[in-house]
Image (cartoon, rainbow, N blue to C red):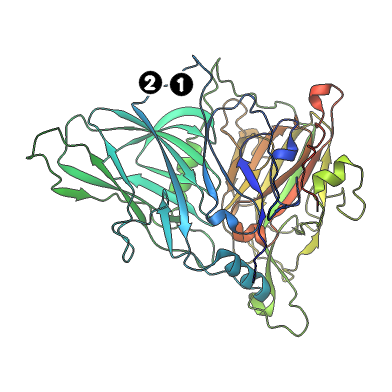
Amino acid sequence: MCKKLYYFLYRHGIRQLQTGWADGPAYVTQCPIQTGQRYVYNYTIKGQRGTLFWHAHISWLRSTVYGPLIILPKKNVQYPFAKPHKEVPIIFGEWFNADTEAIIAQALQSGGGPNVSEAYTINGLPGPFYNCSKKDTFKLMVKPGKTYLLRLINAALNDELFFSIANHTLTVVEADAVYVKPFETNTILIAPGQTTNVLLKTKSQYPSAAFLMTARPYATGLGTFDNTTVAGILEYESPSNNHLNRVVSLFKPTLPALNDTSFATNFTNKLRSLASVLFPANVPQKVDKRLFFTVGLGTNPCQKNQTCQGPNGTMFAASVNNVSFTLPTTALLQSHFFGQSRGVYAPYFPSSPLHPFNYTGNPPNNTMVSNGTKVVVLPFNTSVELVMQDTSILGAESHPLHLHGFNFFVVGQGFGNYDPSKDPSNFNLVDPVERNTVGIPSGGWVAIRFLTDNPGVWFMHCHLEVHTSWGLRMAWIVLDGKLPNQKLLPPPADLPKC
């Protein structure tokens, strides 16, 4: 039996200015590239440099279809730090023994949670802590007295990760392809969809030791997760022709506890934009449109004559403002561009919860979500402030939210319910970190600002793939501006058809 394959490739973090047709998410900016077909992604990268990545953008194909996307500075433009001796991409992933498409299909049919991965990987290798995988260990060979730029990418499907290298300090210099004020740390936290560049300064002398570099999850929810640790090895190159120099010790780092929200918060608060003359932080100072989105889990009723494995016999769901997003069968961008939106999407996504409640207190008895394909429509060049609030429905947890087509500034965050009368006074409008993916704190909120300077249809979704599959996603439509460089370009001739 032949299996029909569909492909969508997304260049995660590339803004695609005026070229939304090359963005890639399934049924948002394009229809499937079907077996035997081809589609040329034609776009220009403008004003960006740093570490991003590419990945599949339909169902759970992202579990194995991904890779680094590194944009170097323009010729003769230097890093805002000393040039490293070497640059090394390090990609975190997940290893499943079963077909991931079968895993999520079974979960969506039963209404329960999907099976978790068997292992995490570093550059595709699970490392020595798993059965029969000692030989499949990533090894980073370094020289004494050198500085290495490690380009860290979290391509895992469903888990935020702590990462550390034994007996070494890391200096964070970039997040999501935007320079940050450097700071030192022994451990970093990186959510799915995020990238972090760190400088690793090696020891001045050959240490006659090797050092494990390990990663394991930061877990805040009530669901099951892969509670394992992946390891690679940092090893120093032995001085030539000296047989006395050999590894006699292997050091292991100490990672934070699985639920160490205190460390996660402190690490996140250290991230600040470089905000220099060459690399300014152009934070919107005025706000044209304020939105308040609740983000969390919920339920759908079990279908007739079916037994479901979700809470109290229901089916797990996830939503934004209680709307669980339903993917259309025609691409949203295509429908918008050709004025054929009727029956495809509704342009009235709620700007705030229709039924407010104590978001982080005792959850309401009714956990059912609504379902639909609703979008927010905004004029070109609108200054947006969006507050995203976690809820306690079926348990509070961290949600890494990713916005296509834009970077945004994380101007504030906190725990408990967002207070619009008090919390804005503490917003950082000077040097907030600029990102494309942000973690909403478990039982808390995060505030972002961005400018709608990119016409088209843009997806926003949780980068925990299971929550996206349950509907924790929505879309924005940014209308054309008046000038030619403010308008969405026409679609390419080979655009896949639905």
Local secondary structure at mark 2: loop
Looking at the rendering, in which quadrant would you find the N terminus? bottom right
Asked whether residue 332 is in view, the answer is yes
Give x and y (percent) for residue 285. 70, 25
**Residue occupied by mark 2:** 82
> Where 311 sits versus 265, above or below?
below
C-alpha span from label 1 to label 2:
7 Å
**Would you say the residues marked 1 and 2 are in contact, meaning their CB atoms lie under 8 Å apart?**
yes
Residue at the far left in the pictured view:
244
Residue at 54 percent across and 48 percent down: it is 66
Give x and y (percent) for residue 156. 51, 53
Give x and y (percent) for residue 498. 80, 53
Q: Amino acid at mark 1?
A: Tyr
> Where 392 sits versus 404, above or below?
below
Label 1 neighbour load within 10 Å: few <14, some 14-19, many 20+: few
Report the number of numbered marks: 2
Instruction: Find residue 79 and name its label.
Output: 1
Q: Quadrant of residue 279?
A: top right
Local secondary structure at mark 1: loop
Instruction: Find residue 63 and name its label.
Output: none
Q: Is residue 311 left or right of residue 339?
A: left
Residue at 86 percent across and 49 percent down: it is 348
Label 2 neighbour load within 10 Å: few <14, some 14-19, many 20+: few
Q: Is residue 353 left or right of residue 265?
A: right
Asked whether residue 350 is in view, the answer is no
Q: Is residue 33 left or right of residue 416?
A: right
Q: Amino acid at mark 2?
A: Ala
Q: Quadrant of residue 383?
A: top right
Q: Is residue 195 left or right of residue 336?
A: left
> Where 287 sits versus 208, above or below?
above
Nearest the camera: 92 or 347? 92
Nearest the camera: 70 or 181? 70
